[in-house]
Image (tube, rainbow, N blue to C red):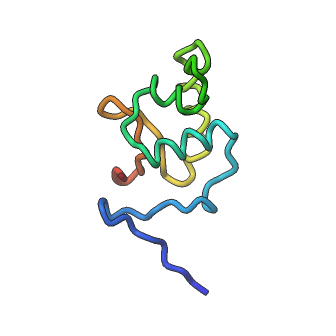
Amino acid sequence: MNRQQPICEACGQPVLIRSELPPLTPIQQAIFDIVRKRPGLSAERLRSLVWDDPSGGPESRNAIFVHVSGLNKRLAPLGVTVRSQGGGYQIVRAEAQSC
């Protein structure tokens, strides 16, 4: 059975299906899921959601950057990256921006 990949109605790009993702660490998976559901979050807000900690997670502001970098290395073969754009994190495809 050959299923057609779903297309996003808003941007016209193919939608990533969870089963297509490479193995991710729990923190990388949390970052991906949060950014997919709520694009445009600042690093500070993303950090507080990922670690779900009243203090906002690790002290270092670099913690999110380090985990996003590792996530991007795993997503690269799919032509997808998570990057800060316009003041917040978004999932972006190599050939065009996705929503």
Please state the total of marks drawn on the protein image: 0
Is residue 20 shown left or right of residue 9?
A: right
Q: Position of residue 18 (x, y in %)?
A: 59, 59
Q: Position of residue 99 (x, y in %)?
A: 35, 52
Q: Residue at x 34, y 34 (%)?
A: 85
Residue 25 sits above or below residue 96 on the image: above
Q: Position of residue 1 (x, y in %)?
A: 61, 87
Q: Residue furthest front?
A: 54
Residue 7 occupies which quadrant of the picture?
bottom left
Q: Residue at x 61, y 55 (%)?
A: 21
Q: Residue furthest top?
A: 59
Q: Decide which of 13, 46 is in the foreground and name it.
A: 46
Residue 64 occupies which quadrant of the picture?
top right
Is residue 76 shown left or right of residue 95?
A: right
Q: Position of residue 95 (x, y in %)?
A: 37, 54
Q: Residue furthest bottom?
A: 1
Q: Residue at x 45, y 62 (%)?
A: 15
